[in-house]
Image (cartoon, helix red, strand yellow):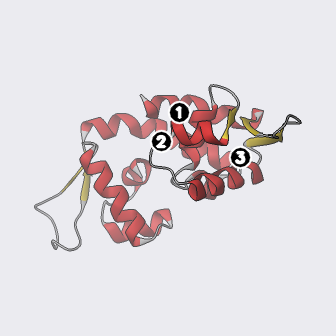
Amino acid sequence: MLAALADTPGRTANLGHALGAGRDSLVRALRELVELGLIARNEGYGHPLRPEYLVLPAGAELIPAGVELVHALERLDATEPGLKKWSMPVVHALAAGPRRFSELRELLPGVTARALTLALKDLVAVGLVERTVTDGFPPSTLYRLTAAAEPLLAPLDRLAN
């Protein structure tokens, strides 16, 4: 979102078009960025129902890492699944090593089982995550990053801190 704000005028319609996001998702993301102090509404501009958003200094510091992350996803041909809400948090959680599904749920507060399942399925499909079923009893499933995910880790670390 911050990377898009760097390139696109910060009006909701422009951002939605640039990101291919639905209105509800976009509004929730913008609200969260405002609460985090990364962007602010430009009160002196436009209609109250169609606000413009400005990047604050704290958000501007994150833009280079966001742009780098988006470019890395483009090079991996993983932009669409990579920009979904839970994909990059899952990649970041797996950076420390292989995890079971339940461990990922604990590391990602707010994620539902369905959202985590869909994120993992998308990441496996594009080759960023490997899924392995163990032979023990009961069998368990481990998820780990593939070597292809390496270019995502440095920008994700900068965004997470």
Q: Furthest-left residue in view? A: 44
Q: Is residue 15 above or below residue 71?
A: below
Residue 54 or residue 114, whichever sits in front:
114
Q: Say which label, 2 or 1, has the lower sequence index.
A: 2
User: At which x and y percent is residue 6?
Assistant: 38, 49
Q: CA distance from mark 2 to mark 1?
A: 7 Å
Q: Residues within 10 Å of mark 1 (few under 14, many from 20)?
A: some
Question: Residue visible at 20% across and 74% down?
Answer: 49
Q: Residues within 10 Å of mark 3 (few under 14, many from 20)?
A: some
Left or right: 45 as drawn, with respect to 148: left
Element under disc 1: helix
Q: Is residue 41 above or below residue 151?
A: below
Q: How many marks?
A: 3
Say what amino acid the circle numbered 2 marks.
Gly
Q: Furthest-front residue in view? A: 137
| Disc 2 to disc 1: CB gap under 8 Å | yes
Determine which of the numbered discs, if any, sits on residue 124 in the image. Answer: none
The residue under label 3 is: 76
The residue under label 1 is: 155
The residue under label 2 is: 66
Question: Residue visible at 69% across and 46% down?
Answer: 75
Say what amino acid the circle numbered 3 marks.
Leu
Residue 28 or residue 5, whichever sits in front:
28
Q: Say which label, 1 or 3, has the lower sequence index.
A: 3
Residue 94 or residue 155, whichever sits in front:
94
User: At which x and y percent is residue 80?
Assistant: 62, 58
Q: CA distance from mark 1 to mark 3?
A: 15 Å
Element under disc 3: loop
Q: CA distance from mark 2 to mark 3?
A: 15 Å
Q: Furthest-right residue in view? A: 135
Say what amino acid the circle numbered 1 marks.
Pro
